[in-house]
Amino acid sequence: MPSPAKTELRRRLRAELARMTPAACAAASESIRTSIPSLANWQAAQTVAAFAALPGEPDLRPFDWCRSKTVLLPRVVGDHLVFHTVETPAQLKPGAFGVLEPDPANCPPVDPANAEIIFVPGLAFTTGGARLGRGRGYYDRLLGTLPPKLTRIGVAFPCQLVNAIPQEPHDECVDLVLSSPA
């Protein structure tokens, strides 16, 4: 059962995200995408795990900037995320929650622990890396299984950066948070 403080924070952030115009979301997403190549370990990374955006999430469009890297995208299977190697957007199809997911018939599954970087969505982040997800625990379960050498990068719009997030023992943090200027 989620804490009342987390429930209220999720409610508040969903309302803030709903107020963002499509143009503001697109501009902030573009700003985030253009900052990715300047990340410290980006050049050396060969495999990158990303995500296809839900409404209200920054749209990373990994095929626009990952041309020389192997891209892994998740698919919801039961209570877990299974990552697949994806080469083109044509290999995606609508899946759980209406988000685009790899077509398992055309995209081989791969252990995300093989990636050097994983981009992580969330409803809120602190600058210290605390993360508030959407409440189903998919990324908390995943991040808890990944090796510490894999860089975890939270991705958020400026309105999703908060001073504090109530933490529970199962909550996983990210190493850094990537956002656009406010």
Image (cartoon, grey):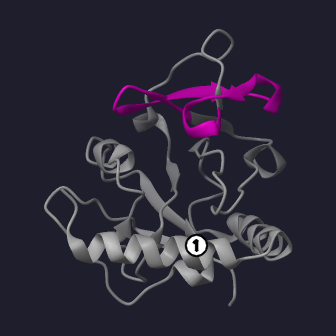
Residue 76 magenta-highlighted: yes
Provide residue 178's location: percent of width, then percent of height: 58, 72
Residue 122 vertical placement versus 19 (above, below): above
Residue stretch rendered in magenta on the structure: 74-100
Image quarter for residue 163?
bottom left
Residue 35 vertical placement versus 158 (above, below): above
Q: Is residue 127 left or right of residue 75?
A: left
Say which element carries label 1: strand
The N terminus lies in quadrant: bottom left
Provide residue 146's location: percent of width, then percent of height: 32, 43
Is residue 20 or residue 138 the one in the foreground?
A: 20
Q: Mark 1 sits on what residue? A: 178
Residue plotted at (68% across, 90% down): 182
Residue at the extreme left: 169
Q: Is residue 108 left or right of residue 136?
A: right
Residue plotted at (63% across, 51% down): 54
Provide residue 38's location: percent of width, then percent of height: 69, 71
